[in-house]
Image (tube, helix red, strand yellow):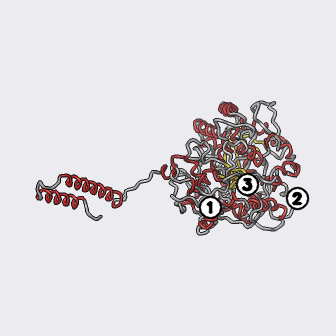
Amino acid sequence: MEMDRCDVLRLFELSSSSSMERGAGKNSRSNVILLAFLSSFIVLLLFYFHFVVLGGTTVDYQTQLQSISDDNNPQSIDQSSSSAFTDDLPTSPSVEFQSVSQQQQQTLATNQYLDDEQIPVTHPNVNVSASPVNRSTTRLLPEKPDKYAFMSALRSMENTSDSCGGRYIYVYDLPPRFNDDMLKDCKSLSLWTDMCKFTTNAGLGPPLENHEGVFSDTGWYATNQFAVDVIFNNRMKQYDCLTNDSSLAAAFFVPFYAGFDIARYLWGYYNISTRDAASRDLVDWLEKRPEWKIMGGKDHFLVAGRITWDFRRLTDDESAWGSKFLYLPAAKNMSTLVIESSPFNSNDFAIPYPTYFHPSKDSEIFAWKERMRHLDRKWLFSFAGAPRPGKLESIRDQLIEQCRSSNVGKLLECRSAEESKCHSPSSIMQMFQKSVFCLQPQGDSYTRRSAFDSMLAGCIPVFFHPGSAYAQYTWHLPKKFTKYSVFIPEDDIRKGTVSIEEKLSEFSREEVKMMREEVINLIPRLIYADPRSKLVKHKDAFDVSIEAIIEKVTKLRMDLVEGGGNRSKDEYPEELNWKYALLGDGDDDDQQPHYEWQTFFDNHKIDIDTSSWKSKQR
């Protein structure tokens, strides 16, 4: 079989010449047979040369995906029905995926790709303005993906006839002690506030009257700033792509009311065992579930509607603040959505505080945005808040003094006779609607709800610490912060080197108009729509968060399928998480780690490490 085409032709010539010399006495029929044989032989040699010697084979991506037969589909944890799951499973937790198939278990035993130390903590830069599943850029899957139980979920992205492909969410049916029972005992959720009324209307609270014409006639509620747990859970019930088939799930939602849980024990003499009890029970329950074992919880997420420090107790000293939930190993694997995240940890992600506006239809959003564009704003800047005499690093005293001494500044001081107005949604929103800029210093922690109330009113926020917004809400706010806000470093205020009035007066009328338009256009993604209805043309804060979570999990899964992919760029010291959260996708040169902000976080990291965080108390 090593003859080439020239040898074959030479043989053909010799054979033909020999036949002619033997004369006409031979039967011409034998010549025809010989020619046919030689022709067939030549064709066979040509095929051999093309397919074996050249080895030219190409496989189209779509053909490769479709060639995976049903017999080779990954063993799904939930092939029949999620109702088959039981609680009487092995109690020893494992972060490696365990399949129902014994053969797959043997295969996975040799792989380390699900060990905690093998999967770097990543903070992907999510483009939430696009679809959560970009079907045209899905990366090539390996030929033998059966060892991954999530392969059906990844392949569903290629099903163009399924609008939910790559977007399915599996919601756990938790025992009621982790959610509904807390609402039944709502009086225990706060020492000072009657949370029973604030958990009505799917978590929105009682409707607000519009006597002064500050609000719209519909869609406004007296929403508590710590009600995100129940609001988010009720919004999830309206999500278009829920599934009971865990093999199709792009992510797993755990409807644990973590914020309500710890709120019961933050004040009073509750020992650490009581504060940690529900959190530990939850992770013990989850680790027994087959869904958890798919990725050791790295595809799970939940909402804890308080600031992160309420769940990050540093010691087991009885006097230390909060619970230890976010330091539990299982919780570190999950993504936890909080209203203020830690700049130094990678397992929590900031989502907006709830505002008072919860539209039930798109027309309410369009009308509100248009109204905010045409308001008469007579104050250049304003501030609503109280001093923080116990915090030496606070700049509130200086801000209050600058507001008082300015003819174009407005102050709503929350410790004087005006204190009641600070608890009045109409008074606060009315001041913001009449202001061009709204001062937003740190609250009891980095962030404060007021920032979102002011942007809802079309007021341009002025921040003094990058941890108050820029390093927090990277899913919901533009990374190029100068488009919608003003930044004045705290030290400039402390040293008295900056006049707020002079600084803000430097912006031209056109610049102010552009920034205000950016703020107004951000409004839909900063609010939570009414959980009892659905928006069609707008994405609210819930939608943005879900898209970001799905893209985060999908990226991690694709990296695992590719054997790690290009992971080196995603590995970084976790305490520098705030820097990498600000990075873009490389298309915007202005997106950088902002090393000049390092001192802001160095100073506050010392405070966090050396004292108990007494977070927002109301």
| Residue 321 vs residue 176, the one in the foreground | 176
- Image height check: is 368 above or below 398? above
| Residue 162 vs residue 591, the one in the foreground | 162
The type of residue carrying mark 3 is Ala
Do residues under tags 1 and 3 come within 8 Å of each other at their CB atoms? Answer: no
Q: CA distance from mark 2 to mark 3?
A: 42 Å
Residue 321 x %, y %: 80, 61
Sequence-first disc among 2 and 3: 3
| Residue 508 vs residue 199, the one in the foreground | 199
Compared across the picture, whether 499 is left or right of 317 comes to left
| SS for callout 2 | loop
Of tags 1 and 2, the one toward the viewer is: 1
The type of residue carrying mark 2 is Gly
| SS for callout 3 | helix
Residue 453 x %, y %: 72, 42
Residue beneath disc 3: 84
| SS for callout 1 | loop
Could one spot residue 346 in this view of the protein? no
Q: CA distance from mark 1 to mark 3?
A: 33 Å
Which residue, as the protein is rendered here, is positioned at the far bottom? 110
The type of residue carrying mark 1 is Val
Disc 3: CA contacts within 10 A as few (<14), some (14-19) or many (>=20): few
Q: CA distance from mark 1 to mark 2?
A: 36 Å
Compared across the picture, whether 450 is left or right of 589 comes to right
Residue 89 x %, y %: 75, 63
Residue beneath disc 2: 268
| Residue 423 vs residue 345, the one in the foreground | 345
Disc 1: CA contacts within 10 A as few (<14), some (14-19) or many (>=20): many
- At 25% across and 53% down in the image, what residue appears? 36
* Res 121 label: 1
